[in-house]
Image (cartoon, rainbow, N blue to C red):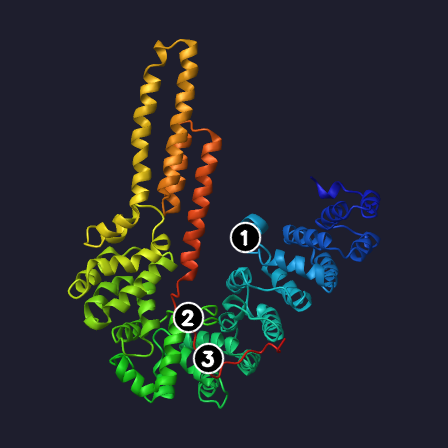
């Protein structure tokens, strides 16, 4: 297509059609080249404030940015900016702008000045119900800050701050939407930057304050004195959620010495074990730090400030090794979930009297999550338990949850290898083994029929087919009598019989069995209480008004 061949007369006719898409593409072609004396056409375009028109104008000016004159560029930009005041147009243009860093959308060298000019208006005008939750805005802004002078992005970042402050009073925002501090730190350290940081920390919403403080402390060395004082003042304020700000500060990776001294009067916490740390911080702040590090309960995971400190991972391990500690249930699950290389060490340290409860916790965790198998850890705890427990008691604890732990019998090997419990567990699913064993018998019978087909008359062939059908019926009936416990046993058998030519009516009976077994699998998983009872997050503030 050659935009310059589009005449004024044809453009005006196209811009008056009833089809919005035709009007939009005509406008895109029209604005893509330098023209003179076309104000009437531009007025037609300007009056057409529809989402498809806005999207086409953006694409048209982005593609022709380097070839059209500045005066024409400004005229078209004025049209787009006017369209952005329509919320639905702003929403569509925002969805396009956040793809500005995509080569397949805007090419190798998109005009980032255009992005910087339009983004603040889009953020200000689109409905406040639209979330910035997928990280696309973050990625596009990060790229823009690398491509153009950072001061050109100041309006966009201020619009992002203002939008977040408005939205946080109505919605729970995630880490992407709240992660404004990082791009703010790319701006010049001036009054405007300080004002925006102060605004974020003044909001009565712990989540926003938590994420902001976290990002500022992570980049502590980049803060001028005034901004550092702002952070430290927040950590010692009289606000009710200061506890959580201190917790996120202390669990930051390599927390800076000034922050540590401000919160603990210590310049380093590296030499301390969990007992010493708890004595230093007090149980309330120590617990808050554990919760923040683990990202539990919600919304602490949601804000992305968890699992940043190796030191706090070590402290969680210390607590997990102390069954008498009130945070032990959480710490044990945390080690099982996030420190799997340390599980065998932990199981070797726990006192004998706590092992059976730990065993039950591990079963609930294995049954209620997609956990890795950790066969070495299971061998350690089973070998230790067999010093004062019978193998029958251990197997009895597995029985109610086995449908959640296993999907097919082959996983027993992955889970328990050759430890002493593997035999009793196989006994629990012996009907699954019996059902799978029918396949060998089936294959022998089918092979005998197939091998003799060349010698059969037509009448005998008909009898052979009836016999084949009867064999399939007997096998399926026997499988139903066995009633395997594991849902993938049913699906494996269905697939095997399907490949051997089993009639669809019989396969549907196996599918019914699979669905029943899968429902049991789901119910067992859902019934597991993997995590301890949720604590009250004392002092936590949500900006949302009560519904």
Cα distance, mark 3 to mark 2? 12 Å
Q: Nearer the N terminus, badge 2 or badge 1? A: 1
Pinpoint residue 361: horizontal percent, then vertical percent. Answer: 31, 65
Q: Is residue 57 left or right of residue 217?
A: right
User: Compared with residue 85, is residue 274 higher up or lower down, i.e. above or below?
Assistant: below
Residue 245: name its quadrant: bottom left
What residue appears at the point 77 percent right and 57 percent down from the top-left corner? 49
Tell which of 158 and 280 is nearer to you.
Answer: 280
- The residue that label 3 is drawn on is 537
- The residue that label 2 is drawn on is 295
Tell me the SS state at disc 3.
Answer: loop
- Numbered label tally: 3
Q: Nearer the N terminus, badge 3 or badge 1? A: 1
Tell which of 422 and 152 is nearer to you.
Answer: 422
- The residue that label 1 is drawn on is 102
Pinpoint residue 50: horizontal percent, then vertical percent. Answer: 75, 55
Q: Which mark is residue 508?
A: none
Tell which of 440 and 376 is nearer to you.
Answer: 440
Q: Which residue is the extreme one toward the left?
A: 387
Pinpoint residue 33: horizontal percent, then vertical percent. Answer: 71, 49
* Quarter of the image with the C terminus in it: bottom right
Q: Nearer the viewer, mark 3 or mark 2?
A: 3
Pinpoint residue 60: horizontal percent, then vertical percent. Answer: 68, 51
Q: Is residue 188 left or right of residue 369?
A: right
What residue appears at the point 43 percent right and 74 percent down from the top-left corner? 534
Q: Residues within 10 Å of mark 1 (few under 14, many from 20)?
A: some
């Amino acid at each position: 297509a050659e935009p310059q061949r589009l005449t004024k007369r044809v453009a005006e006719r196209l811009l008056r059609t009833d089809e919005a898409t035709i009007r939009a593409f005509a406008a895109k072609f029209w604005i893509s080249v330098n023209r003179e004396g076309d104000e009437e056409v531009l007025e037609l375009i300007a009056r057409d404030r529809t989402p498809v028109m806005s999207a086409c104008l953006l694409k048209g000016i982005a593609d022709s940015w380097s070839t059209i004159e500045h005066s024409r560029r400004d005229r078209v930009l004025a049209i787009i900016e006017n369209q952005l005041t329509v919320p639905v147009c702003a929403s569509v243009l925002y969805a396009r702008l956040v793809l500005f860093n995509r080569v397949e959308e805007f090419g190798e060298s998109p005009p980032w000045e255009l992005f910087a000019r339009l983004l603040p208006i889009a953020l200000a005008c689109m409905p406040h119900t639209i979330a910035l939750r997928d990280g696309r805005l973050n990625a596009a802004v990060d790229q823009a800050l690398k491509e153009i002078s950072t001061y050109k992005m100041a309006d966009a970042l201020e619009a992002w701050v203002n939008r977040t402050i408005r939205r946080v009073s109505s919605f729970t925002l995630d880490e992407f939407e709240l992660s404004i501090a990082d791009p703010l730190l790319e701006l010049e350290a001036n009054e405007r930057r300080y004002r925006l940081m102060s605004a974020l920390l003044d909001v009565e919403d712990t989540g926003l304050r938590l994420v902001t403080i976290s990002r500022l402390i992570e980049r502590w060395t980049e803060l001028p004195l005034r901004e550092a004082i702002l952070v430290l003042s927040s950590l010692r304020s009289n606000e009710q959620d200061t506890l959580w700000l201190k917790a996120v500060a202390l669990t930051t990776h390599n927390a800076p010495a000034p922050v540590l001294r401000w919160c603990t009067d210590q310049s380093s916490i590296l030499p301390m074990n969990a007992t010493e740390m708890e004595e230093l911080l007090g149980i309330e702040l120590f617990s808050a730090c554990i919760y923040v590090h683990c990202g539990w309960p919600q919304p602490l995971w949601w804000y992305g400030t968890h699992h940043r400190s190796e030191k706090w991972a070590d402290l969680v391990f210390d607590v997990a090794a102390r069954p008498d500690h009130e945070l032990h249930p959480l710490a044990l699950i945390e080690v099982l979930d996030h420190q799997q290389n340390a599980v065998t060490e932990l199981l070797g340290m726990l006192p004998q009297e706590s092992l059976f409860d730990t065993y039950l916790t591990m079963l609930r965790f294995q049954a209620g999550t997609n956990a890795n198998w950790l066969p070495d850890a299971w061998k350690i705890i089973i070998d230790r338990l067999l010093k004062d427990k019978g193998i029958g008691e251990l197997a009895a604890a597995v029985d109610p949850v086995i449908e959640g732990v296993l999907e097919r019998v082959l996983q027993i090997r992955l889970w328990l290898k050759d430890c002493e419990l593997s035999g009793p567990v196989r006994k629990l699913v012996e009907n699954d083994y019996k059902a799978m064993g029918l396949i060998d018998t089936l294959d022998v019978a089918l092979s005998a029929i197939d091998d003799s087909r060349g010698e059969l008359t037509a009448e005998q062939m008909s009898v052979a087919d009836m016999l084949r059908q009867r064999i399939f019926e007997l096998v399926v009936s026997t499988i139903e009598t066995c009633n395997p416990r594991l849902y993938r046993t049913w699906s494996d058998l269905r697939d095997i019989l399907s490949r051997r030519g089993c009639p669809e009516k019989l396969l549907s009976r196996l599918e019914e069995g699979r669905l029943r077994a899968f429902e049991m699998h789901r119910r067992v998983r859902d019934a597991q209480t993997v995590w301890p009872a949720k604590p009250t997050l004392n002092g936590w503030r949500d900006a949302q008004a009560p519904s």
